[in-house]
Image (cartoon, rainbow, N blue to C red):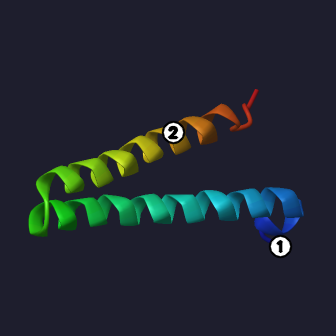
Amino acid sequence: MTAVANLSLRTRRLRAWIVLAWLVLAVLLIAGVVVGLAVSGLAGVIIFGVGTIGFLVLGAIVFMFMPRRS
């Protein structure tokens, strides 16, 4: 039996939302680089910055609610 099977539905949904947010932020970072190089430097920096700040916030949220081992 895997560890995921023992988790509640709420925890599995939360993990799914975190993974989805991580993927969206990764796409924002890549899009920021592409837009910055191909279209407009300022727009690329803004999109890349939003993705970067999103990663920092998501990381802070995940670590804030991470259970502590004693």
Q: What amino acid type is highlighted by mark number 1?
A: Met
User: Residue shown at 62%/42% (left/top)?
Assistant: 62
Left or right side of 13 for 40 = left
Q: Which image quadrant: the C terminus?
A: top right
Near mark 1 (Cα within 10 A), the count class, few <14, some 14-19 or many ≥20, is few
Q: Which image quadrant: the N terminus?
A: bottom right
The quadrant where residue 38 appears: bottom left
User: Residue shown at 22%/55% (left/top)?
Assistant: 43
Q: Is residue 16 above or below residue 61?
A: below
One can see residue 52 in this view: yes
The quadrant where residue 69 appears: top right
Q: CA distance from mark 1 to mark 2?
A: 33 Å
Which residue position holds label 2?
Answer: 57
Q: Residue furthest top?
A: 70
Left or right side of 18 for 12 = right
Badge nearest the viewer, 1 or 2: 2
In primary-sequence order, the first of circles 1 and 2 is 1
Which residue position holds label 1?
Answer: 1
> Element type at marker 1?
loop
Q: What count of labels does the image hold?
A: 2
Left or right side of 17 for 40 = left
Q: Is residue 55 above or below residue 70?
A: below
One can see residue 3 in this view: no
Q: Is residue 5 above or below residue 11?
A: below
Q: What amino acid type is highlighted by mark number 2?
A: Val
Nearer-the-camera pick, 23 or 36: 36
Nearer-the-camera pick, 20 or 7: 20
Q: Position of residue 47 (x, y in %)?
A: 31, 54
> Element type at marker 2?
helix
Q: Residue furthest bottom?
A: 1
Asked if marks 1 and 2 touch (Cβ < 8 Å), the reply is no
Nearer-the-camera pick, 48 or 19: 48
